[in-house]
Image (cartoon, rainbow, N blue to C red):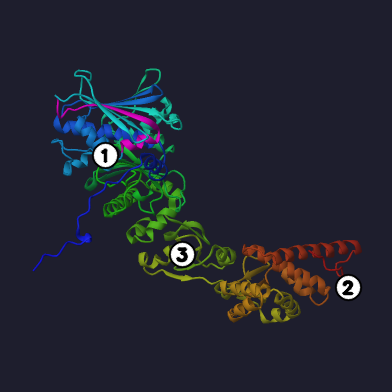
């Protein structure tokens, strides 16, 4: 039996190597991976820090310094006292894109726990320098192989490079020197002032000494270690003042207070600064996150819970994972755990204020009560703790919910700000306890009150509930006012509104418009139906609701209402109608609801109409003419 001949499909094919267009890759980095060309200096400093870390694994007493020289032939020079590179290392790490040069003490690529000591982990750091440089020169002498000669690597943005071995003794000490020759469009990033600014921005918390020698030869110290939160102070007050000064320097505001952060699980330490001014919940504060001393991001909104938008943090961590660009935090379970831990620390701070510093707590709540209410929705313990201090808008003024509940065992809450403003004056005069639930979180918190204060009843308030609490008018008085009420109902019917006569406080309010949500929705539906084409009119007509209409409640205690009722049978009917329209318009304004164009026209028409009657009365000496009366003023 013969052996079958292998088919072409089963014949092993030779492998091929990906070809990398360096110019295209640099364009990808500058326009898509990195947010700005400024990251080039961060990558250089990062490589220098990692090189020093690697050398100290070999020799803990090795020097640790990074020097940046500016205005060197239009470029910059970065020198470090790190572990350095051999010629073999240069071929392996500088000429191979994507290969990380981070190694352990044995010189091999380090995948052990010691790798946590390094900042960079993606092997593209030096490549970022081509974003601003046309040429990169690296001169390095290895500390791992003391007898190895120094080597020079010269890379160009066209993707070519050259390597040469330098004469013995040309480089005295181990370490690396990187020189950047700027591109035409990158020279601004290598200017002396810009380099100092970037070095401070990225390296302020680095643990190794970093200096910049400017164009005048002056030495500028970039970092100030240890971090302010790790220093020793003579008293708690001195520490608090030092932290506040640091907050002003970093965030340009005077913090209300500072909260220490310490999460050993991820080697995180730092400070959360409480903002002195209100912050909108949807506009998250920027947080500065340093990874092993190097700034990772100054806009890390993902570091703190959504509800803690009233703090801005500065932290240094060893255990959080950066994204490939090293400009943000990688969203994973570890980051979620850190976020929860920071949230718990903020809760503890609030609890401590309630127990020991009520003055500061009141100042905090004056500014950030919205944030605390957001947190209290999900934290009954915190709600019970801070309830005596949280302010709410009520018919008793701006008071705490706890104080309000003691005065009103039955707490009524509106669903909108408009409804509260509509009923508040009348409800307050009637002794009803109403809370404005139209603001974010307030209605939800008010409904949680019985869980915290047993015995308190909470119910949603419909505007009709207020009208039910108003006093009825004596039947004889209502019968005497029947002609006026009939005319008022005829006028109000044009506005899809009913009329009722009641007695209520305050006496100075002649009329109140009670308009529930269903009535407003029905009017809006009718308006849209009248303007829509036949198809949409039919659809909107099918949604017709039998919701109750709005009510114009006239106050029998008000002198103006009594006078109009007396004149209903003798005065010009047109005067009565104009007066009723004016009363309706005033009630509209008192309800503070948005006015439609038709409402504006009504207010204008009734005002001008009353002016005409007043002018005629002044001219004839009588306000009770039997003439037909002036023509209706047009808007």
Separation of disc 2 and disc 1 at Cα? 100 Å
Q: Which residue is mark 3?
A: 443
Say whether marks 2 and 1 touch (CB < 8 Å): no
User: Residue reaching furthest left?
Assistant: 1
Badge 3: few (under 14), some or many (20 or more) residues near its Cα, within 10 Å?
Answer: many
What are the residue bounds of the magenta stretch? 125-146
Q: Quadrant of the C terminus?
A: bottom right
Q: Residue drawn at (53%, 65%), measured in percent from left and top?
A: 416
Residue 628 tag number: 2
Q: Is residue 139 magenta?
A: yes
Percent of width and height locating residue 181: 38, 27
Q: Is residue 409 magenta?
A: no
Q: Residue drawn at (54%, 72%), measured in percent from left and top?
A: 462
> In the image shown, does 199 or 143 lie closer to the viewer?
143
Q: Earlier in the sequence, mark 3 or mark 1?
A: 1
Name the image quarter holding residue 63. top left
Position of 131 with respect to 551 (left or right) is left
Mark 3 or 1: in front is 1
Percent of width and height locating residue 29: 38, 42
Position of 172 with respect to 356 (left or right) is left
Rendered position, 113 above or below 188 = below
Name the image quarter holding residue 451. bottom left
Q: Which residue is mark 1?
A: 96
């Amino acid at each position: 039996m013969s052996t079958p001949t292998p088919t072409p499909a089963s014949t092993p094919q030779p492998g091929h190597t990906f070809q990398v267009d360096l110019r295209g890759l640099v364009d990808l980095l500058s326009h898509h991976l990195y947010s700005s060309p400024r990251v080039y200096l961060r990558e250089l400093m990062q490589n220098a820090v990692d090189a020093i870390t690697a050398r100290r694994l070999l020799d803990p007493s090795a020097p640790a310094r990074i020097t940046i020289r500016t205005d060197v032939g239009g470029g910059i020079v970065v020198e470090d006292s790190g572990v350095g590179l051999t010629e073999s290392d240069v071929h392996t790490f500088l000429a191979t894109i994507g290969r990380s040069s981070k190694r352990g003490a044995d010189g091999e690529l380090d995948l052990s726990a010691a790798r946590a000591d390094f900042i960079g982990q993606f092997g593209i750091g030096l490549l970022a320098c081509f974003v601003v440089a046309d040429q990169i020169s690296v001169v390095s002498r290895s500390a791992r192989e003391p007898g190895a000669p120094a080597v020079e690597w010269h890379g160009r943005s066209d993707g070519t490079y050259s390597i040469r071995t330098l004469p013995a003794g040309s480089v005295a000490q181990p370490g690396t020197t990187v020189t950047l020759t700027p591109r035409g469009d990158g020279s601004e990033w290598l200017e002396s002032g810009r380099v100092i600014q970037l070095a401070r921005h990225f390296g302020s918390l680095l643990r190794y000494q970093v200096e910049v020698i400017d164009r005048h030869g002056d030495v500028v110290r970039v970092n100030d270690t240890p971090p302010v939160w790790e220093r020793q102070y003579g008293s708690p007050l001195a520490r608090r003042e030092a932290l506040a000064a640091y907050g002003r320097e970093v965030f340009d505001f005077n913090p209300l207070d500072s909260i220490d952060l310490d999460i050993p699980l991820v080697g995180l330490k730092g400070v959360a600064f409480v903002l002195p001014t209100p912050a909108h919940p949807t506009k998250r504060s920027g947080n500065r996150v340093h990874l092993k001393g190097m700034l990772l991001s100054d806009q890390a909104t993902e570091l703190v819970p959504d509800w803690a938008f009233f703090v801005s943090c500065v932290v240094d961590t060893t255990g959080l994972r950066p994204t490939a660009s090293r400009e943000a935090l990688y969203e994973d379970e570890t980051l979620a755990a850190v976020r929860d831990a920071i949230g718990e620390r903020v809760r503890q701070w609030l609890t401590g204020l309630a127990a020991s510093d009520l003055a500061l707590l009141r100042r905090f709540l004056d500014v950030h009560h919205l944030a605390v209410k957001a947190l209290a929705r999900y934290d009954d313990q915190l709600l019970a703790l801070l309830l005596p201090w949280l302010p709410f808008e009520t018919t008793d003024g701006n008071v705490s919910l706890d104080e309000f509940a003691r005065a009103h065992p039955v707490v009524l809450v509106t669903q909108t700000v408009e409804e509260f403003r509509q009923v508040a004056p009348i409800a307050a005069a009637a002794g009803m306890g109403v809370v404005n639930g139209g603001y974010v979180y307030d209605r939800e918190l008010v409904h949680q009150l019985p869980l915290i204060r047993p015995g308190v009843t909470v119910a949603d308030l419909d505007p009709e509930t207020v009208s039910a609490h108003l006093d009825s008018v004596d039947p004889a008085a209502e019968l005497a006012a029947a002609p006026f009420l009939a005319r008022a109902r005829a006028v109000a019917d044009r506005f899809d509104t009913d009329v009722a006569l009641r007695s209520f406080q305050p006496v100075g309010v002649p009329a109140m418009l009670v308009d529930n949500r269903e009535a407003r929705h029905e009017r809006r539906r009718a308006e849209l139906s009248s303007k829509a084409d036949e198809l949409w009119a039919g659809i909107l007509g099918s949604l017709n609701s039998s919701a109750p209409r709005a009510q114009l409640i006239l106050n029998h205690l008000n002198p103006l209402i009594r006078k109009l009722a007396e004149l209903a049978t003798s005065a010009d009917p047109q005067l009565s109608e104009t007066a009723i329209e004016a009363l309706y318009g005033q009630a509209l304004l008192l309800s503070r609801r948005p006015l439609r164009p038709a409402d504006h026209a009504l207010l204008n028409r009734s005002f001008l109409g009353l002016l005409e009657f007043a002018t005629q009365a002044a001219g004839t000496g009588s306000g009770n003419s039997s003439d037909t009366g002036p023509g209706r003023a047009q808007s």
